[in-house]
Image: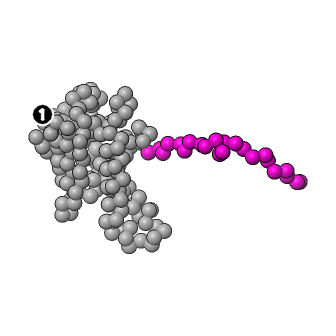
Amino acid sequence: MLRGLKTLTFVYVPREDRVVAAINAGQGDAWSCWLTRRLALGVLERTSEYLQSKSDLAQRAPANLRTEMIAFERDAAIAETAGAMSITPPAILEQSATAAELAERLTITPAGESFRLELFGLNGAGAAALFKLVELQRMLQMLQAEVAKAGWLLSPAKPQTPAESVTADPKPSRH
């Protein structure tokens, strides 16, 4: 059953080491699913790359300013959507986490001037909605904030080989 997505909340749950996506939390058509590290990072990476490639502002800017232009567009989208944000009570989020199923697939596809987000769980349930660009950027920012809380953006430390761990004798210095 594919539900209409009206509200979306992401929460990192340390004991699960996953992010719960609470769809329409506290409403009759509520549904939730767990996003794994691999799924969340994959969505963030691919969607961010796609949005960067489609940014008119970034395409018109000199190469050395493109990153700043993309950040400017994202910040403007966050400011524009700030009024739509609300706080979901913790008890409702706990219920969502308890009832969550594992997410199997999250897709974001262009749909004219909008983007269609579809999220499916292993049991066949899911949710879908059309997002304007600014809403999609807000949703990605929300997911990225939870991924950052999880520490998933940090790359693992490169293990040292025995040859690297041995320090050479210091060179004599002259004053």
Which residue position holds label 1? Answer: 28
Q: Residue at x 44, y 45 (%)?
A: 153
Q: Quadrant of the C terminus?
A: bottom right
Task: From the top left corner, tell me how far across and down residue 19 is, in percent.
Answer: 32, 37
Q: Residue at x 81, y 51 (%)?
A: 171
Please say whether residue 174 is one of the residues in the magenta stretch. yes
- Locate the N terminus by quadrant: top left
126 above or below 175? above
Prevailing secondary structure class for the magenta stretch in the rendered image: loop
Q: Residue at x 23, y 51 (%)?
A: 107
Measuring 32% from the left and 60% from the top, which residue is drawn there? 50
Left or right of 75 in this view: 92 = left
Identify which residue, 57 or 171, lies in the foreground. Answer: 171
Residue 74 location (% of width, % of height): 36, 56
Q: Relative to 67, is 77 on the left or the right?
A: left
User: Residue 32: x, y in percent?
Assistant: 22, 36
Residue 164 found in image quarter: top right
- Mark 1, residues whose alpha carbon is within 10 Å: few (<14), some, or many (≥20)? few
Q: Position of residue 80 (x, y in %)?
A: 30, 54
User: Looking at the picture, does residue 49 appear above or below residue 120?
Assistant: below
Task: State whether residue 165 appears in this view.
Answer: yes
* Segment colored magenta: 153-175
**The magenta stretch spans residue 159:** yes
Secondary structure of the residue carrying numbered label 1: loop
Task: Say which amino acid is labelled 1.
Answer: Gly
* Image side of residue 68 versus residue 127, left or right: right
Furthest residue in direction left, as rendered: 1
